[in-house]
Image (cartoon, rainbow, N blue to C red):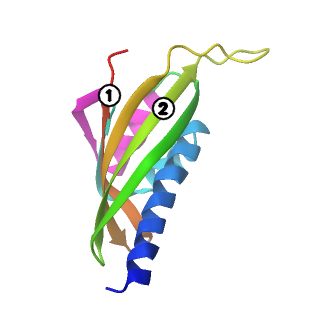
Amino acid sequence: MTSDERRAIEWDCTRLINHYAVLNDQARWEEVVALYTDDGLMTRPTAPDAPIIGREALLASFFSRPPRVSRHIVGNIVVTVEDAMSASAFSMILLFTGAIVEDGLPVAGAPLVGEYRDRFALTPEGWRFSERRGALSFRP
C-alpha cells in the first residue's frame, strides 16, 4: 500500500466519524444507520456493555430515544489502517444535550466526555463502521 492510499483511507474513515456526529445531531437516523455495515455493532458511551447489532436494531434504538437537541464535538481522531479493506480508530467526544423547547435555546445539562473505538470495513457502499464502541471517560 502506498502512502497516498493509506492517507486516503485515513481521510475517508476520519470523515465517516465526523459525518456520523453531524447526522446524529440532526436526528437523521436512517442516514446514521447507513454508515454501518449490515451487521454493524454499536455501544453507546453511556451503555458500553449493551451492544446493539445490525442496522434494523440500530435504527429501532435511535428512534426509541426521547427527542433532544445534541451537539457532538469530536477530536483526537487517530485512524490505523490495517489493510486495504479494514481500519480502526480512536476518537474523543464531548457531548452536549438539552431538551427540545418551543421557544428559545434549550438548556444543556453537564457535558459528557467519552471516547469511541471504531472498526471499519470497506464495502461496496464505501467505508462503513463494523463496530463503534463508546465509553465514558468521566462519571456524569
Q: Which mark is residue 94?
A: 2
**Quadrant of res 22:** top right
Look at the image and tell me in which quarter the C terminus lies. top left
Is residue 52 inside the magenta stretch? yes
Residue that label 1 marks: 137
Residue type at mark 1: give it. Answer: Ser
Q: Which residue is painted at 46% across and 59% down in the image?
A: 14
Dividing the picture into quadrants, the one containing residue 87 is: bottom left
Q: Do the CB atoms of the residues marked 1 and 2 lie less than 8 Å apart?
A: no
**SS under mark 1:** loop
- Residue at left 41%, top 72%? 9
Residue under the image location 42 percent in, 51 percent down: 77
Outermost residue, right side: 103
Q: Residue furthest bottom?
A: 2
Residue type (three-letter) at the residue carrying disc 2: Leu
Residue furthest out toward the left: 49
The span from disc 1 to disc 2 (Cα, nearest Å) is 10 Å
